Amino acid sequence: MRPVVLYILLLIPLSLKAQRPIICDSVYLSPDTLPHYKNGVKDLMAFSKDSIITAISKHCGGPNSNIYSLRAKLLIRQNGTVTEVTFRHFNGDPECRKRLEKILLNMKGWKPAINKGKPVCCYAPFVIGCIRWH
């Protein structure tokens, strides 16, 4: 009985550690080159219009939405994937926030930050202003 309990106690920490992916061992605040989306601002604007603004208008209150701008900080990994989204001053409901976070986390096309010739983790701002004009 005692070896079985010891075996189970050893497996629990190992299984918990296996479930948590290592995101970034360090995040660079001022790398040589900042992360950027595909070919630049035009592509980022197209993504915002096609994905974010569409989601806000369809699923976040539409014309009655109180979301006038969107400010987020995205953590871009060394491989160009978005692994963390932090919203600042978000006025939408929690369900809308989850939907927008999911869209941003699934965003493909980021080129990672570069420091000393190597890709590194870095934050990238994601800002959309004037979503709805009065």
Image (spheres, rainbow, N blue to C red):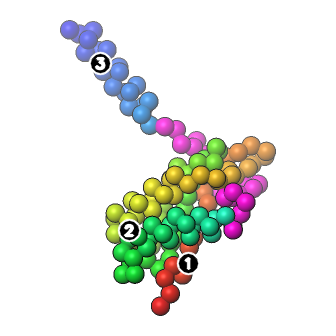
Is 87 a magenta residue?
Answer: no
Residue 32, x across and y down, in percent:
76, 54
Look at discs 2 and 1 and give the one toward the viewer: 2
| Residue on which the image places disc 1 | 129
Q: Secondary structure at mark 2?
A: helix
Instruction: Name the quarter where the N terminus is drawn.
Output: top left
Q: Earlier in the sequence, mark 2 or mark 3?
A: 3
Measure the C-alpha gap from mark 2 to mark 3: 45 Å
Measure the C-alpha gap from mark 3 to mark 1: 53 Å
Q: Nearer the viewer, residue 5 or 120?
A: 120
The kind of residue tagged 3 is: Ile
Q: Disc number at residue 1?
A: none
Q: Residue furthest left?
A: 1
Q: Disc number at residue 59?
A: 2
Q: Is residue 13 above or below residue 90?
A: above
Q: Nearer the viewer, residue 2 or 54?
A: 54
Q: Earlier in the sequence, mark 3 or mark 1?
A: 3
Q: Is residue 75 above or below residue 24?
A: below
The kind of residue tagged 1 is: Gly
Q: Residue at x 54, y 81 (%)?
A: 130
Marks 2/1 in contact by CB < 8 Å: the verdict is: no
Q: Secondary structure at mark 1?
A: loop
The magenta-colored residue range is 21-42
Measure the C-alpha gap from mark 2 to mark 1: 19 Å
Residue 125, x across and y down, in percent:
60, 64
